[in-house]
Amino acid sequence: MRNRRLINKVAWALFTICFVIVLNFFLFRILPGDPARAGIRDPRLTAEAQQAIRVRFGLDKPVINCFASINPPKPADCFVNPLDTQFFIYVGNLFRGEFGISYHSNQPVAQVLAERTWNTLLLIGVAQFLAIILGVALGVIAAWKLGTPVDYSALIFSLVAWSLPTFWLGIILLFWGSTNLGLPIGGMVTPGMNYASIWAQVIDVGRHMFLPTLTYTIVFLGEYMLIMRSSLIDVLSEDYVLTAKAKGLNSYQILKAHALRNAMLPMVTIIALNLGFTVAGAVQIETVFSWPGLGGAIYEAVGQRDYPMLQGAFLLLAVSVIVANLVADLLYTYLDPRVQLE
Amino acid sequence: MESQLFSLYILPEHLWGEKTAQAAIDFTNDTMVGSGPFKLAEYRQNQFVRLDTNQDYYGSVPKVDGAILQTYGNQDALVQALKTGEVDMITEMPNTAVAALRNDANIQLVVGAPLDPGVTDIIFNLVPPDQCPPDGKCTGHPALKDLTVRKALAHATDKQQLIDIVLLGLGTPGLTLIPDGLGVYYNNTLQDYAFDIATANKLLDDAGYKDVNGDGVRETPDGKAPLSFRLNWAGDMSSGPRIAELLSKTWGEIGIKVEMQGLDPDTLTSVCCPAFDYDIIIWGWGSDPDPAFLLSVMTTDEIPTGTSESGYSNPEYDELFAQQAVETDKEKRKELIWEMQAIALRDLPYIIPYYGQNVQAFRKDRFQGWITDSSKIALEDPSSLSLIEPVK
Amino acid sequence: MRTKDVTAHVDEKMPPTAAKPVLSVCSLSVDYVAPPKPAAHAVQDVSFDLGRGEVLGLVGESGCGKSTLALALMRLLPPAGRIVNGSVRLQDIELLDLDEARMASLRWSQIAMVFQGAMNALNPVRAVGDQIAEAIRQHDRTIGKAATVRRVDELLELVGIAANRRTQYPFQYSGGMRQRAMIAMALACNPAVIVADEPTTALDVMIQAQILDLLSRLRRELGLAIILVTHDLGIVAEICDRVLVMYGGVTAEYAPVDLAFNAPRHPYTQALLHAFPDPDHPQAKLNSIPGAPPRLDALPPGCRFAPRCPQAMERCQQAAPALYALPDDQFASCFLVEDTAEDRRGSLDHG
Ligand SMILES: Nc1ncnc2c1ncn2[C@@H]1O[C@H](COP(=O)(O)OP(=O)(O)O)[C@@H](O)[C@H]1O
Ligand SMILES: [Mg+2]
């Protein structure tokens, strides 16, 4: 039973990824704009130079049989060798684990993505971890002290944190932290730090991380707190909580044995989805703190019609969302026996 | 091609060696071979470039050991970094930060034309349907082909107000596509159309553009089309909406209506040129040190290529353009170029609201010797970087 | 008035104990306070005694305060519920005076509860056996793991559930099984009293019969005292010794079950019996009681039943009748019994 469910889920995930691979390819080609010109608003780029760029990146080949270009739609020979079209070259390369070369930076997409993803994961991983721990704790305390000043203060704090514009909060924290704590204003490392000891480097990254992590934590903390609070309030009004109380369990025991696990169920889904989506980074936070993350890379790649970067990045995003969902699903199976045995 | 050679650097013989001129232009120098006063020590994309001083430099060796060019994701952070001393110099800032920095005792502001001077332009679609290029749609409003209407619009454009509001004063009134930052090539003798609503109204009245149906918007002399123009701008231009708003106010005073819409740069390119599927566009150019390219934008040859945005075509101008391209006497070439500017201002394919100025700043307590009095401001240029030395 | 022969069941019942009652409730009143709304007097001045092995039926239409009373006994009222008056003595301990920790230790070990709707009363994500074991360990810290498991199996078997279903989850149980599991859980610590709030509502007749059999067996074998909340008079007739009829938060009638069925004195009790299908005359017309119970936050000035009472008099509109003690341990709060009353609140006066 359980295994079949697992296999089903994994099969679906793989199918979705295949779908995304195809979608990714055509999606960006539907956007107007020419990668040989976008990002270089230099009209002096001669037709020959543009053509050279196209040849270099294989953009001179038909997109797929019958289509030289999708937007604007231009017909082409339908009887070319399909393997010599952009689409199948792209698919073939993917199967060989090649994501191609970024049109813009000329670096291998895999390398750029790997570096950016690591930067993003570092920031978001730590921040999400803190946000979850603090948000859940705050939510539990508030639900526990429902209707008391403690609850109201936590609630107001979370509502404010949740509704604060990220960009604004980031700028405020940036001004505050750089002036009062002497923290760095932007970037991830101090240039030249690569000569220092590994410890000095870790501390340096930590100092750079502090403010963006704080901003990110505050932004997500509110959401988690609000969800945890309302979820726990719901659970605490369930009959089985009354049963537990009737059995002589004290408040703390009830929370531990009956309420928390049940209240965490909706949280698991939300956390997993957040984790999946935030691999894209938080473009706003990256912008405020000049953090070299994935979000900024994607943002730039869109503007530059950097197809290989976009394809690679969106595949990465899709995979992370799908994997996060899968993990949420499996975790759910573990947390809720109803799912696992149905 | 000659005008493109300025961007060639001095490189060792084994690199330039037998290359043809075109190959030299196409050469991308991926391995960063150079001959300047600094050497690349470390590069992290979108983060920083760290330079070490080239001790073997053939000129005067910089007094500093190196320089770090750090990238910030937003301009507010940049200003803050200068204030806290995280950086010693910044190359740009939001105009709103200027006042605060000016009052900071440790910081020196430097204002002037940028190294690559920028032009903000208001483009008119001048292409008549019967001269439409092969890929064109040519849907421009017929009234804009009438110089009288363009003159009226120029008289109804309050350039000083645009500079004060949009640039917070950091700009100079524009004349033609050739900005004042180009030094001698900029024709400073030209007389601009004065901001004068009455003159503008009179021009239109005399030419027969009357508001016949009383809706506050003038109609063409044949009474058919109202003077209502599409006004687009590039969505990535933060100044776009404000310029459009101010224009619509003063132009409204002479009975001309605009429908405003920002478009993303790709869409704008596709309606602009060579499609000519617009009425008026607010956009901009960055300039080379040489005016040749910006002058070419108004030539007939560039209409089908998409470089000509207005579709302006004037044999007299084209002839002057050809002459200046081969004129080797600098003074004579300047005369030709000045004349072309006079023609451009007379015929008004563009209204140039302003030329932006660059504001840079450095900390007075860190390094001294920055070049602040040149006609163009570029503290990050090696010329400045190799002169500065720590404050004692 | 129809009569109902309940003597058939009498031999199954224990004689009311002469000894001290296990549970003694006196003048208990509960309000629901949720400002700015006026307080709702959900239970007012209710008194009863419950002896060892005795079953008390608590009947009345929905909204009469039965569940409120049941929860008040265990001090499990929601935050808005306040016990405003009275006493609840469980084996000579005054529950209303205990601090929360002491109360917690008495809950389940002395007085346990079977809740209305066992689907929701069991935690859906924990195994049933686990939830029973939890109750055991809560009150016996010394018991070992293996002993707990043995005890759980024993309890499950007692209520007719195979021990191998211990590790299953509530959703894998049928409705009747869940209710029986709840009963097993209630028995876990050998309590003196079990409060069963509508334990058979929403179950089909077969299962209902099984549960009732189980309850009567338990009280016989274990000497359990049971408070059975129900609005099904058939159940009352079947297993209860005494019955307390509530109307609008007050006691309408409190009597031994045969008197309540054969000689009900309160018009509400009579009306309830009329509205109840008689197994001997299934064709007989049922007379449902017109109207609805009063809103507890806006009670009529006089007798609470007066607006619906077929025999209401002028007097009933002005003043509320006291609970009159009648012969044979019968009590009714109605002016119609005033003449035959031995005493107001007679032997139930605990002071
Ligand atoms: N938490 C509560 N807050 C306010 N009023 C309540 C609450 N619970 C029950 N009541 C009111 O108390 C009265 C008695 O309810 P209840 O004891 O559940 O009746 P029964 O069990 O007889 O159907 C009802 O009128 C109900 O509206
Ligand atoms: Mg009830």
Image: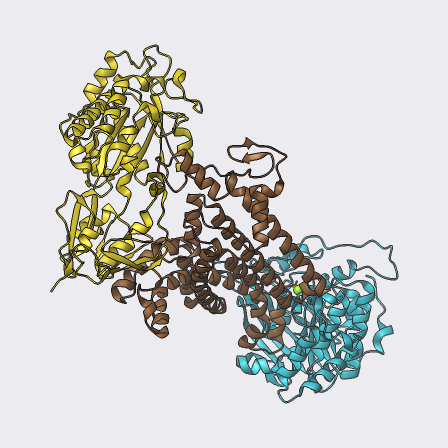
Chain colours: A brown, B yellow, C cyan
Residue B160, quarter of picture: top left
Q: Nearer the viewer, residue B216 or C68?
A: B216
Residue C78 at x, y = what percent? 56, 68
Give the position of the N terminus of chain A as an image quadrant: bottom right
Q: Nearer the viewer, residue C166 or C276?
A: C166
Residue B321, quarter of picture: top left
Q: How many marks?
A: 0
Residue A106 at x, y = what percent? 42, 50
Q: Nearer the viewer, residue B125 or C112?
A: B125
Residue at point 23%, 23% (across, down): B320
Residue A238 at x, y = what percent? 60, 65
Q: Residue furthest front?
A: B18
Horizontal arrangement in the rendering, residue B345 relative to residue B305 (left or right)? left
Horizontal arrangement in the rendering, residue B210 relative to residue A306 (left or right)? left
Whether B350 is drawn above or below B64: the answer is above
Residue B174 at x, y = what percent? 21, 32
